[in-house]
């Protein structure tokens, strides 16, 4: 388990960057853009007569626009998938969890097929036994060779899971 000092440091950075810095960056951007740009140009001053009106208009337009951009980032573009790919490649714990899940899924599906056949009093074929034996050998080899510092989990995910 990580040192509690480093955990506190992590929580501090998340609180700072996600909430504190975000709020102050928004306030700073609104203040600077209004008082250095809009306040100096009469045509813009007609559209935004005071700071409160400017904040209200920017909020009404900005929040839905930014929600749409955030939605597009996660659901409509390849940007988020690239971020997740990088996370899997760079974080050995994430790639280990994904590799373990993929191995368990493949092995469970093969074993379930055999259990269903046995439940129906059907005979298990040599091919089915060979398939399960192959999976067991492959996963056992991977489990014994992989470490958090080598790239065996990522290689497995790329080759077998298509990630």
Image (tube, rainbow, N blue to C red):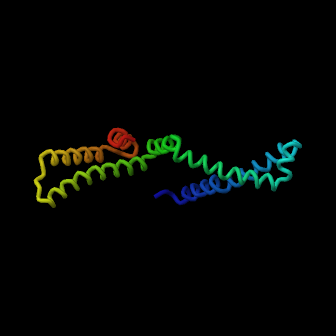
Instruction: Where is residue 6? Give x, y as percent.
Output: 55, 55
Left or right for 33, reference 133: right
Residue situated in front as seen by the camera: 65 or 25: 65
Instruction: Where is residue 53? Give x, y as percent.
Output: 81, 54
- Pick the quarter of the image with the C terminus: top left
Instruction: Where is residue 31? Give x, y as percent.
Output: 79, 50
* Residue 121 vertical placement versus 94 (above, below): below
Residue situated in front as seen by the camera: 2 or 38: 38
Left or right for 28, reference 63: right
Residue situated in front as seen by the camera: 140 or 145: 140
Instruction: Where is residue 66? Give x, y as percent.
Output: 64, 49
Left or right for 88, reference 141: right
* Residue 117 vertical placement versus 43 (above, below): below
Q: Residue at x 20, y 48 (%)?
A: 132
- The count of marks equals 0
* Residue 146 vertical placement versus 12 (above, below): above
Left or right for 38, reference 8: right
Q: Residue at x 26, y 54 (%)?
A: 108
Residue 114 location, quadrant:
bottom left
Q: Residue at x 40, y 47 (%)?
A: 95
Q: Residue at x 67, y 56 (%)?
A: 20
Residue situated in front as seen by the camera: 8 or 152: 152
């Amino acid at each position: 388990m990580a040192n509690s000092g480093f955990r506190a440091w992590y929580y501090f950075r998340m609180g700072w960057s996600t909430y504190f810095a975000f709020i102050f960056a928004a306030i700073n951007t609104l203040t600077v853009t209004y008082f250095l740009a809009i306040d100096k140009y009469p045509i813009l001053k007609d559209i935004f007569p005071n700071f409160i009106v400017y904040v209200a208009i920017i909020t009404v337009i900005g929040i839905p626009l930014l929600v749409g951009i955030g939605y597009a980032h996660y659901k409509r573009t390849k940007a988020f998938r690239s971020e997740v790919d990088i996370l899997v490649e760079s974080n050995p714990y994430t790639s280990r969890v994904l590799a373990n899940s993929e191995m368990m899924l493949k092995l469970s599906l093969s074993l379930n097929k055999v259990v269903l056949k046995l439940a129906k009093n059907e005979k298990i074929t040599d091919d089915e036994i060979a398939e399960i034996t192959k999976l067991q050998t492959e996963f056992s080899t991977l489990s014994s060779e992989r470490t958090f510092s080598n790239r065996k989990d990522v290689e497995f995910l790329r080759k077998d899971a298509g990630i």
